[in-house]
Image: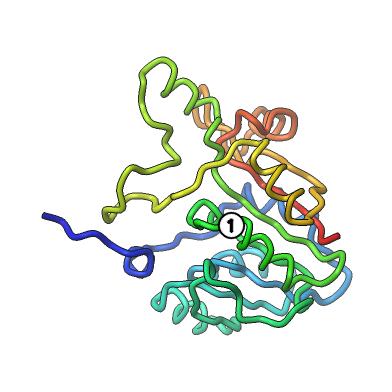
Amino acid sequence: MESHNNQKETYNKREFKAYKQHRLNKIKPYIPWDRKIKILDVGCGDGSFFDSILEYRTNLDCHGTDISRKQCKIATSKGYNIKQSDVSQGLDYQDNTFDIVISTEVIEHIFNTDRFLTELKRVVKPKGLVIITTPNIANLGNRIRLLLFGQRPSCIDFCSRQGTSGHIRAFDIYDMQELFNNNGLKIIKLMGREFYLPFKLTDSKVANYICKLMPNICSGFIIISQKE
């Protein structure tokens, strides 16, 4: 019988690919380009986000933290300032340290999401940005899966076996708005991450139009927020 895995064991076995360009294109306009920026990637993996954004600018002071020892070693070898830690237990950084804190596809792995957002807010400077991406449980594909076929939405799991996503939380657009508002983060922009139906339209004009106007049916969210 296959043994159960804790999160640290699961993420040590993960392999990361280059940060998805269409997601980066949606985030880039909100990152100031006229000055040096100190940025923290929470759940940084092997540093793929930094790899991608540094192709466009060099005046970034890149810091990251991740639970995976393996991925932290890879990111450190690239020259990034990396700390290994369990981000669900807090962040080992001083208050008001970073201009931008970004965390992509992490919050759905966190049990105490309020504490998580409070920590992101704590370490970002006043008026600094907190950027989150996460799946949308109410995306159009999941609505079809559940209503027509009676199947579990794809962004949540029923077990913790190796090969599953490790998601323990799921959000719709109203959950995101409430979480951010309750934790003192003002949402500047909430947009769709990508749209996949009726076929894969990841970075087409149609997909980008839907992501802008109807994020509630997209596969995930990108939330740009500011510390109040």
Q: Residue furthest top?
A: 148
Q: Measuring from the top left, give residue 191's x and y in whole percent.
A: 71, 40
* Rendered position, 125 above or below 199: below
Does residue 147 appear left or right of residue 136 in this picture? left
Q: Which residue occupies the foreground of this view, 105 or 167? A: 167
Task: Tell me which amino acid carries mark 1.
Answer: Thr
Residue at 67% across, 36% down: 174
Residue at 61% across, 64% down: 52
Residue at 86% across, 60% down: 228
Residue at 42% across, 36% down: 154
* Rendered position, 192 above or below 163: above
Does residue 75 appear left or right of residue 120 in this picture? left
* Residue 69 quadrant: bottom left
Whether residue 114 is visible here, answered yes or no, is yes
Check disc 1: other Cα within 10 Å, few if <14, some if 14-19, many if 20+.
Answer: many
Q: Measuring from the top left, give residue 140's x and y in whole percent.
A: 54, 25
Whether residue 59 is visible here, answered yes or no, is no
Q: Measuring from the top left, give residue 227's x and y in whole percent.
A: 82, 61
Which residue in the structure is indicated by mark 1? 104
**Quarter of the image containing the N terminus?**
bottom left
Mark 1, secondary structure of its residue: strand
Q: Which residue occupies the foreground of this view, 220 or 92? A: 92
